[in-house]
Structure formats: C-alpha cells, structure tokens
Image (spheres, rainbow, N blue to C red):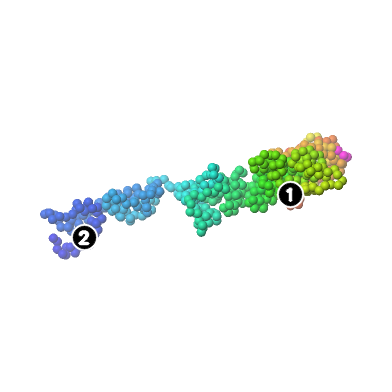
C-alpha cells in the first residue's frame, strides 16, 4: 500500500479517474473490478492505469457519438416522431452505453449537428428553397401539411374538402378570426359552407395565402360573394374592377342585379350606363331572362332607356317564359301573367304605335279582352278610357355631338365622292357610346347619298352600317347612325370611316382641332391611314361624332 503522502499527492488525479470510471459502461467497470486475488495492484493504481488508457477510448467514443448524432439529426428526418429536442425516445432494451453516449453528446448542440448535416449531406428543405415569407405561405395554400381545419365547401353532392390553417385565415379576415379565436369559436375540425362555390372559395384562400388574385368570368360573381361574406375588401374591389372591365350589354342586367345585392354603387352606375345606351341589346340578351323580379321592375321603370316599347314588351314575355321554367310551371298565358304580377303594367303599351300593338301585344293573349279593348279605344276614340299602363313614352338618352371643325366651305371642284374612303382616328378620356357620325351634304341643292359607315379598333370592325341620307343643300351636318350604339373605352384610339357615293359635291370642314372638349369628355383626333379621299385632322369629311356619355 502506498503511504499517506503518496495518496495525497495523487488525490486530484484519482478524483478525475473516478469521474471517468463512473462514466464507463457497466460491463467495463465489472471487467476492471479488483478482487482480493494475489498479485493484483491496489485500487488506486488500477484507476491510474485506466486513466491512461481512457484517452484513446474517449477519442473512439467521440467519433461514435458524432456518427450517432448524424443519424439522430438528419435534415430529411425533421418530421420523425422519434426525435424530440435533438434526442431519441428512451428505449428500454438499449444498454446503458447508449445513455452514456447521449449524456456526453449534450455538449454538442443538436442544431449545430443538424446544420452540419444539412450543409454537407442532405438536400435543403422546402423552407430553404423558398426564401421569402410569401413563397412559403403560398406553398401552404390548399395543402394538408400542418392543416388544422377543413372546410366542406359547396352544396350537398357537389361539395369539396379544402384544408386550411386557422392562423393564416384569421390574419386575413375578421370573420375567420372570430370563427376560430372569438368567444364563440368553432371547435369542429370540419366546417360546412354550402352557400359558396368551391372554385370561388379557393380563389379567396389563394389571395389570403399569397396575395395573388386569379379571376375568371365564370366565377367572379361567386368570388365577389365570398369576399363580401368573409369581409375581404381588397379582393371584393378587384372583383368589381374585373366586372366593370368586362361589362357588356349582354351581361349588364345580370350584373345590375348582383351589384344591388352586393351594395356596389359604382358597379350599379356602370350597369345603368350600358343598359341605357344599349337598351335593346341588353333587354334582348339571355342575361335579361336571368334577373329577379325586383330588378325587372326597376328596369321597366327606367325613364332613360333608348329602346322601342315593342321591344320592351317582347323582352318581358321572354322573361316570363324563363321564370315559369324556373318555378316548374308550364309557359301558359295565365302562368306568365301570374309570375309577372304588377311588372306587366310597367310596360308602356300606349307608347307603341297602333300597328305595333295590333301585331304584337293584342295577339299574344297576355292581356284580358277588356284590357285589349280599352287600349284600342285609347288609340282611336276621342273619349279615351282609363288605362293601368303608363301613357307617356320613355325619354331615352339625349345624344351629344362632338364637332371637330371650326368652319366649313365648298368649292367648285371639292368635295367629290367616287367610292373613296374618308377616315379619322379618335380617342376619349372616359368611356362613351358611339351612336353614329355627322356628315356634310350637298353644297348645291337637295341630294341623296348612299353611305357605308364603320368603326374599328386595331383593325377589328366593331360596327358598320349601310344606309342613305338626304341633304338639303345647307352646310348643316346630317346624322348617320349605327344599328346599335357601340361602347368605346378610354385612352385607346378608334377609327371611324365613311364611304359616300353621290353625284353632287359637298361641303367640307376647315380649321380642324386635334383636341375637343365636349361636356365632360375630351376627344383627341389624329389622321388615319385608311383615309383615301383627303380627310384628315385639319379638314375634310366626318365633322361630327354622335355619342352618349
């Protein structure tokens, strides 16, 4: 046995050796246990021997631990349920050697080991390949990954299951915020939304996840409904702008009905502009037959419709037939009258000509015999009976004229027509409806001209008409109209042309202006390459544009 001084001298070294001994696996400690066998060294010398050999084993153990760490924290296994805070779940069948390696690996940060592994071995994760928050959020759209709520969207039998994330929806909509985090928060994992179309709901969610708006004509109204329902004003505004841009006579009545439902006054006003100016096209469209009864009554009360009343009557009959079909009724005269109700008496039948009434309304049996008899008396008798129908004709829109010349003149050899084209280009600063052109006539006496007028944009013909007009020998302009007014968008150049045929010389314009202010509309003019008869900005034919605004 060594002396006490020797033990004191090596006391610090022995304590360090004891630390190593405690960390050794159980089997190793057993193999190093000292018995009372002859020839064996005392315990302290055994420990000293172990301390010398442990350095090599420590190095080997460190290498094993690094290998184990690489296996525990690979980038591809971030979703492994067996990993928790960088360590494996305890395995009761593992030996104590595994516990020792876990304890000693605590000095190495799991994040560090994981970063090392991501950089050197495994490919980057989806988070790394999408550096911006918007990109990563967009990946979660309609994605089951981490979804904590599901929506069953659409009516029964046509529904679609859509995964979502409560936090994202709550941030984008006060309705969703109250739904998920309010006092009456939804606790169900599946939420049914039968009144929204699946396609529209997906457009709504895509905007909330990525700020992207993908609108289509077939789904924009349903999307507007969804945006209004969940109070997403930016998306609703985008829908309104889309509808205004795509507004035409054939869909104006449907959009009018929807704009009233959604309380969008700007869209409502735009619809009225189209319906007033292009009333015949609007009321004869399929969309007119799809509106509700209240919207029908509002249109029939409109004073500014540019339309003949006989056309209004025919349109109302078409609507009644469609409404009978929607209600599952046969299109009989009685059923049509029942679905129309008071709307029938908003048609201004007395404003038709006698011939129009006799050939149309009087023969369709929608009126009773007494009503038909009284209308005929109203047309012919000196003492007119009382009628339930409005008696006065609609006022319609008052056409405006843009005159681009400051003076006119005539000469003995000008302005001659032999089938050549007079043409000019124009642009406006707000949307208008071109109804026709004003043209100069004969400079000598009364004369008749045949004329073909045309409106084009970028070479595409928008409207044309072949007609005649008679001039009286004065320098006045004579209107020639298209069959229907044509919508003209702002800040785009259009080309109007006129090909006249007549033996008489005519007046022509002088001192033309490149810019003309007409009411609230500013016109700009420039020469057209289609013009082969001398008309340009400074002089020539086509002195006026007739329009509604």
Residue drawn at (37%, 54%) of the image:
85
Residue 481 picture location, percent across and down = 77, 41
The mark tally for this picture is 2
The residue labelled by disc 2 is: 14
Residue 118 point in image, percent of width and height: 40, 48
Magenta residues, dominant SS class? loop
Inter-mark Cα distance, 1 to 2: 108 Å
The part of the chain drawn in magenta is 443-447
Indicate yes or no whether the magenta region holds residue 217: no
Q: Which residue is mark 1?
A: 301
In terms of secondary structure, where does tag 1 sit? loop
Asked which quadrant contains residue 436, the reply is: top right
In the image, residue 444 lies in the stretch drawn in magenta? yes
Q: Nearer the viewer, residue 464 or 209?
A: 209
Q: Residues within 10 Å of mark 1 (few under 14, many from 20)?
A: some
Mark 1 or 2, nearer chain start: 2
Residue name at image x 64 percent, y 51 percent? 261
Please identify the quadrant where the N terminus is shown.
Answer: bottom left
Q: Are marks 1 and 2 in contact (CB under 8 Å)?
A: no
Residue 234: % across, % down: 59, 52
């Amino acid at each position: 046995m060594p002396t006490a001084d020797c033990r004191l001298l090596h006391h610090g070294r022995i304590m360090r050796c004891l630390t190593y001994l405690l960390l050794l696996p159980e089997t190793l400690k057993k193999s190093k246990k000292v018995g009372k066998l002859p020839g064996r060294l005392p315990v302290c010398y055994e420990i000293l021997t172990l301390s010398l050999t442990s350095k090599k084993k420590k190095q080997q153990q460190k290498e094993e631990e690094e290998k184990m760490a690489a296996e525990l924290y690979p980038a591809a296994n971030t979703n492994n349920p067996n990993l928790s805070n960088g360590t494996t779940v305890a395995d009761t069948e593992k030996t104590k050697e595994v516990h020792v390696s876990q304890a000693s690996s605590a000095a190495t940060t799991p994040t560090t080991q994981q970063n090392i592994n991501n950089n050197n071995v495994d490919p980057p994760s989806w988070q790394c390949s999408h550096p911006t928050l918007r990109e990563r959020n967009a990946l979660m759209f309609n994605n089951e990954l981490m979804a904590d709520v599901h929506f069953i969207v659409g009516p029964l039998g046509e529904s679609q299951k859509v995964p979502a994330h409560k936090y994202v929806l709550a941030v984008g909509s006060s309705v969703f915020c109250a739904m998920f985090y309010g006092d009456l928060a939804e606790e169900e994992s599946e939420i049914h939304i039968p009144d929204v179309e699946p396609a529209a709901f997906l457009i709504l969610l895509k905007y909330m996840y990525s700020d992207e708006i993908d609108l289509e004509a077939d789904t924009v109204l349903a999307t507007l409904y969804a945006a209004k329902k969940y109070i997403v004003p930016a998306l609703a505004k985008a829908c309104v702008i889309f509808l205004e841009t795509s507004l035409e006579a054939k869909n104006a009545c449907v959009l009018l009905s929807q704009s009233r439902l959604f309380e969008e006054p700007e869209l409502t006003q735009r619809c009225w502009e189209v319906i007033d100016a292009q009333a015949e096209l609007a009321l004869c469209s399929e969309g007119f037959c799809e509106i509700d009864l209240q919207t029908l009554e509002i249109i029939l009360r409109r004073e500014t419709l540019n339309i003949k009343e006989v056309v209004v009557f025919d349109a109302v009959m078409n609507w009644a037939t469609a409404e009978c079909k929607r209600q599952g009724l046969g299109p009989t005269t009685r059923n049509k009258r029942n679905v129309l109700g008071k709307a029938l008496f908003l048609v201004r039948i007395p404003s038709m000509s006698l011939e129009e009434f006799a050939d149309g309304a009087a023969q369709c049996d929608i009126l009773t015999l007494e009503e038909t008899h009284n209308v005929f008396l109203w047309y012919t008798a000196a003492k007119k009976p009382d009628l339930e129908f409005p008696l006065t004709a609609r006022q319609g829109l008052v056409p405006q004229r843009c005159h681009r010349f400051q003076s006119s003149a005539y000469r003995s050899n000008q302005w001659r027509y032999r089938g050549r084209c007079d043409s000019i280009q124009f642009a406006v600063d707000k949307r208008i409806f071109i109804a026709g052109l004003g043209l100069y006539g004969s400079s000598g006496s009364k004369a008749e001209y045949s004329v073909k007028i045309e409106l084009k944009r970028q070479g595409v013909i928008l409207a044309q008409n072949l007609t005649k007009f008679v001039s009286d020998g004065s320098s006045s302009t004579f209107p020639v109209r298209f069959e229907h007014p044509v919508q003209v968008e702002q800040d785009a150049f259009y080309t109007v042309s006129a090909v006249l045929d007549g033996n008489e010389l005519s007046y022509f314009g002088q001192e033309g202006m490149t810019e003309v202010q007409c009411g609230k509309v500013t016109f700009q003019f420039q020469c057209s390459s289609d013009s082969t008869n001398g008309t340009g900005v400074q002089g020539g034919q086509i002195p006026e544009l007739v329009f509604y605004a």
